[in-house]
Amino acid sequence: MTDPAPWWHAATAYQIYPRSFCDSDGDGIGDIPGIISKLDHLADLGIGFVWLSPVYRSPMADNGYDISDYRDIAPEFGTLADMDRLIAEAKARGIGIVMDLVVNHSSDEHEWFRQARQSRDNPYRDYYVWRDPGPDGGAPNDLQSNFGGPAWTYDERTGQYYLHLFDRKQPDLNWQNPELRAAIYDMMNWWLDRGVAGFRMDVIDLIGKDPDAGITADGPDLHRFIREMHDATLKGRDVVTVGEAWSATTEGALKYSGRDAGELSMVFQFAHIVQGWDEVHGKWRPKPFDLVAFKRVMTEWQVALAEDGWNSLFWSNHDLPRAVSKYGDTGRFRVASAKMLATVLHMMKGTPYIYQGEEIGMTNVSFTDISQFRDIETLNFHRIQTAAGVTPGDFLDGANSNGRDNARTPMQWDAGHQAGFTTGEPWIEVNPNHAAINVAADRTDPEGIIAHYRELAGLRRELAVMREGDFTSYLEDHPKIIAYARRHDGARISVLANFTGEAVAVDVPEGLALTGRAISANYPGRDTLTGRVELRPFEAVAILEA
């Protein structure tokens, strides 16, 4: 007898960025009561668990990813009682709440850091990473922050530098300190005992860093720390964990999520994201989408984790551009391309994540001035890159294409005032296209994008071949078509999709050809994939063999 598959193999996940989801009190900031008011929307979609971006108490230098109290809720989001009610109300609908766990760093306003900077012999000093100035009196070394500029800030009171791999208001926690680790594990158990369904672990690949050796990701103690965390908090609990690991490779992923790893359920890897970034300017000068390169990455991960580990599947999140704008079409074929992207992703093996608004085909915003942006990373790099000679116009083009604020404009619930997100002035502008693109409008269409996502979530719960089937890629060098098959216990699904706004004729490979019924399609009338077929613009079809 083999152990039954974990519940999250059959689940479809949904990410909520609370600040931008639904505002219940008119202050322009989304909140927990607002989320509760929309749980029926998620239940109707068939969501199994929600990844909730941070709602802890925070000064919001990085919109909540700078935590000042891990055991309290930011007042703009609500109260701890609101959080308990969200967990309970979601559970009543069969939805788990997965908390965002940010433990690579805290806020500089956390009591631990307030104490740590009082003196070098303070009991909390070693909760953070401190170093003496370098020989020249400057920073200890040349480590750079992910948000731009040096990763070291000088603290005049104690005469040392502290490390921050992100903003200076986000000092890195010192995982080499067993007392710090024990405090984190105690906090995690506190949340698990309150009923959360697991954790999404922010930049977890950085906690094993060795800053003196210039090592930030995949440090020598990384997996020892995560295994210790697992044993102290997760072991024996029926929860789901996903680690954000920008450095993850296929081989490294098995160290996190392999059957015998004893660490996490899965990781978020970003190889399919960064292959579209410029080698020098990074995401601020994106390269044209290369489907062949994209397929190569996705196939590599599907094959590598075929027998062990588990994939997380996503197009977008709170740090990435909108999927339709990046990979589909924002004009005539917006709906078709949104459905195509959903079919292609959700038919793969792994846990699919829907980012809020993806289920209605929300698009990138088009800001015309840097003052409209709110993201600390974007604002920092605007200063750095324009000082280095990049024109403001070129930077805005890059930010409008790949900046993090694209995913953070308010959720578009209806065509009314502020898209139904708030009765007040939103913290960031609503995309003007909410008049046409919104939940209320999409729900009136039985063939809408929401209906398409609902069907995919239902199929994942229903079909073992969709959850557990092996993966075979076809037409790997075709620049316009993605094609793959899933097989399990005698069942077979074939998936064929056109990533362009033009009709594309293609000969169906022998291993992909079959006749059956279309279980996911964005155009009607196709139940057979044999011979030469002509795919309509952004057409995607998944056929289950009869």
Image (cartoon, rainbow, N blue to C red):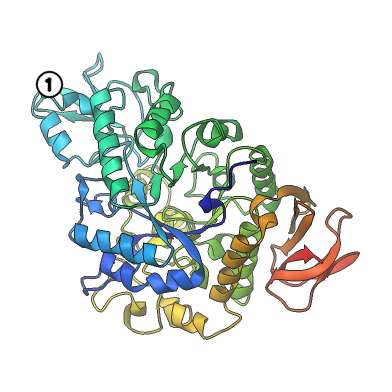
Residue 194 placement, left or right of 498: left
Q: Which residue is mark 1?
A: 120
Q: Residue furthest front?
A: 1
Q: Is residue 333 above or below residue 228?
A: below
**Residue 541 screen position, x and y as percent:** 73, 67
Of the pair 104 and 405, the residue shown nearer to us: 104
Q: Residue at 33% of width from left, 35% of height from top?
A: 165
Q: Is residue 197 above or below residue 495?
A: above
Whether residue 368 is visible here, answered yes or no, is no
Quadrant of the rendered image containing residue 520: bottom right
Quadrant of the rendered image containing residue 403: bottom left
Whether residue 37 is visible here, answered yes or no, is yes
Q: Amino acid at mark 1?
A: Arg
Q: Residue furthest top?
A: 135
Of the pair 28 and 456, the residue shown nearer to us: 456
Q: Is residue 60 above or below residue 121?
A: below
Disc tally is: 1
Q: Quadrant of the image for the N terminus?
A: top right
**Residue 372 screen position, x and y as percent:** 32, 64
**Residue 469 screen position, x and y as percent:** 70, 50
Residue 320 placement, left or right of 130: right
**Residue 303 screen position, x and y as percent:** 69, 41
Of the pair 194 and 128, the residue shown nearer to us: 194
Quadrant of the rendered image containing residue 334: bottom right
Q: Residues within 10 Å of mark 1 (few under 14, many from 20)?
A: some
Q: Residue at 33% of width from left, 78% of height from top?
A: 418
Q: Quadrant of the image for the C terminus?
A: bottom right
Q: Is residue 188 above or below residue 219?
A: below
Q: Residue furthest right?
A: 531
For mark 1, give the secondary structure: loop
